[in-house]
Image: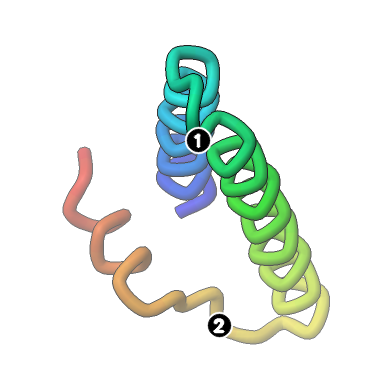
Amino acid sequence: MSVTLGLIWIAGHLLTEFGANHAQSYGVSLLILSSLWTSSYILIEMGLMVRIWQRRSLQLPGLSDLSRKLP
């Protein structure tokens, strides 16, 4: 699941960075979106680490099912 989450994050980050570099009118908005995307990724990862520490289930809605379906 961590690999899937990392791949989703890198895809979103690359798309927003690419858009910010090539968009003149709304480049700053995309950079803000990129920072929010990264911040949410870090918060999710920290939450998963806390759940591991508490020995709780690591189920995330939607992401857990997607992780099981990928090879």
Residue 13, position as x, y percentages in the image? 53, 33
Toward the viewer: 23 or 50?
A: 23
Residue occupied by mark 2: 57
Q: Residue at x 41, y 45 (%)?
A: 4
CA separation, marks 1 and 2? 40 Å
Residue 54, position as x, y percentages in the image? 79, 84
Horizontal side of 32 relative to 62 (left or right) equals right
Dot in front, 1 or 2: 1
Residue occupied by mark 1: 26
Figure quadrant of residue 7: top left
Q: Quadrant of the C terminus?
A: top left
Residue 52, position as x, y percentages in the image? 72, 72
Q: Can you say whether 61 is above or below 46 in the image?
A: below
Please state which amino acid type lies under the numbered disc 1.
Tyr
Figure quadrant of residue 48: bottom right
Q: Residue at x 25, y 67 (%)?
A: 65
Q: Quadrant of the N terminus?
A: bottom left
Q: Can you say whether 46 is above or below 19 in the image?
A: below
User: Residue 51: which disc?
Assistant: none
Horizontal side of 7 relative to 67 (left or right) equals right
For the image, the number of numbered tags is: 2
Q: Residue at x 25, y 58 (%)?
A: 66
